[in-house]
Amino acid sequence: MVLSKSTFFNHQCTFYVIIVLILLRCSTSRASNIQLQDILLQDEKGTAWIKNSLIKSGVLNTPKYNFTEKFDSEKSVLEDNIKGLFFEGLPYHDKPTKVFCWYGEPENLSNESKVPAIVLVHGGGGTAFTQWVKEWTNRGYIAISIALEGQLPGKKIEVENGKKEYRTFEFSGPKRQGFFLDVGYEKLEDQWFYHAVADIMLAVSLIESFPKVDSKNIGITGISWGGILTNVVTGIDDRFAFSIPVYGCGYLHETPHYKRLISRLTKEQQAFYLNNWEPSLYVPLQKQPTLFVNGTNDFHFTMNGFTKTYKASKAEKYLSVTLNMKHGHYPGWEPRTIYAFADYITGNQKKPIRSRFIDLNKERGLTYTYQGELSESYLYYTTHTADWGRDNYEWKETSTKINTTQNTIKAILPEDAVAYFINTLDTEGNLYSSPMRLVSKN
């Protein structure tokens, strides 16, 4: 076929236009890749950068504070040993902040006494709780529960869109914006997570200055988001004698719920979170003994990420995993094992039971060894994990055989099991777990 000059010219122009479009697309793609690389490089400041920023902000100095009776009506008649307290937080958008806490001491504590203390870190939808403080003061601890989103005591009030939130005031700091949604448009010093970590460290700086506090025996426990914060702050601040994160763990990008939330962030937000705030960055830096607490089917913090978090710790560590444990503040401070662990660290009480995997033989016979005063033990297994979503698998309980002479625990693992762990109970009913293991496909 012979083309006319005009037809040839048109084809030639079309060809050049296509070439230009391809080059532009490649250039744009390359620019996009370079931009993302720049973001990743910019955000690869990491844990040392975060720690240095916090220390420079003054969180290791004793903050100014004052006790207040303004909210005493929010306490019960059995909580007279608990007081309201404000301490000065870090500036937010260049304005001063004050952080409300409930502070409690054991009843009838003499002025000459020195007792261990605990910092209580609430989760999403929570605030400073007098009931939580009371749980610890009843056991001989000084306790401080921090309101980490600028909340004041009292019932939630209705705000826009029918939502209910705790009241705030003119000195409130930032509120949590979903899952790190403020990353990207707020500078580091104005991000909620930064302020939450700072508030925890300031609370430690405050109570360690109190004469009745044994400053070498200050612990921390946090529930849900408070558990996330606990895992992070203990990798930054080595003043804690022990740590008890409940539910909250690291490797959130590998858990179904948080993987979805992370996917909704911009690339810049994802990079900043993964390089600077992911708890698994901080867990290996921890020096204090830790008890990791969770339930088998927690929706937010699934067993895959939770187990990896435990394994990432290089310090003395223990697990307590309850079958189908409910998620919430009250269920999160209820387990007696939490208090037994704290007493073990601060009062040289009974050491937790530690079980160790030995063998899974060809006949599916499981063998563990253990240390401690064992009363009962159970094997838990699941036949299907799917994506680790709460409703996609269930854990089944089966019996074990305890040999107190050889300090062994034996059980038969069912043929269809794909993951398993054992729970042990000591003579006082405290529950400790072995880390979950996956059955090899070989």
Image (tube, rainbow, N blue to C red):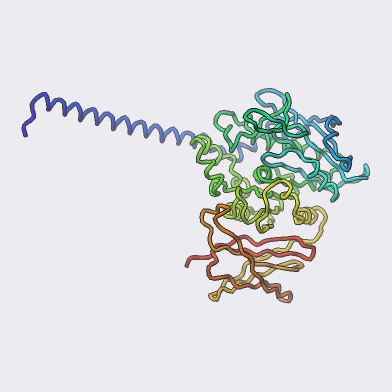
- Counting the numbered discs, the total is 0
Q: Position of residue 94 (x, y in %)?
A: 67, 23
**What residue is at 93 percent from the left and 44 percent from the top?**
110
| Residue 212 visible here | yes
Q: Residue at x 67, y 70 (%)?
A: 369
Q: Pinpoint residue 149: horizontal percent, then vertical percent.
A: 69, 33
Q: Which one is in front, 24 or 285? A: 24
Q: Residue furthest front?
A: 162
With 80 as the anchor, is 391 left or right in this view?
A: left
| Quadrant housing residue 11 | top left
**Residue 90, picture quadrant:** top right
Foreground pick, 125 / 418: 125
Q: Quadrant of residue 412?
A: bottom right
Left or right: where 330 falls relative to 47: right
Can residue 292 be seen in the rendering of this structure?
no
Q: Quadrant of the N terminus?
A: top left
Tell me where residue 240 appears, x and y as whole percent. 74, 46
Percent coordinates x, y for residue 266 in the rendering: 50, 35
Residue in the foreground of this view, choosing between 307 and 358: 307
The residue shown at (84%, 29%) is: 70
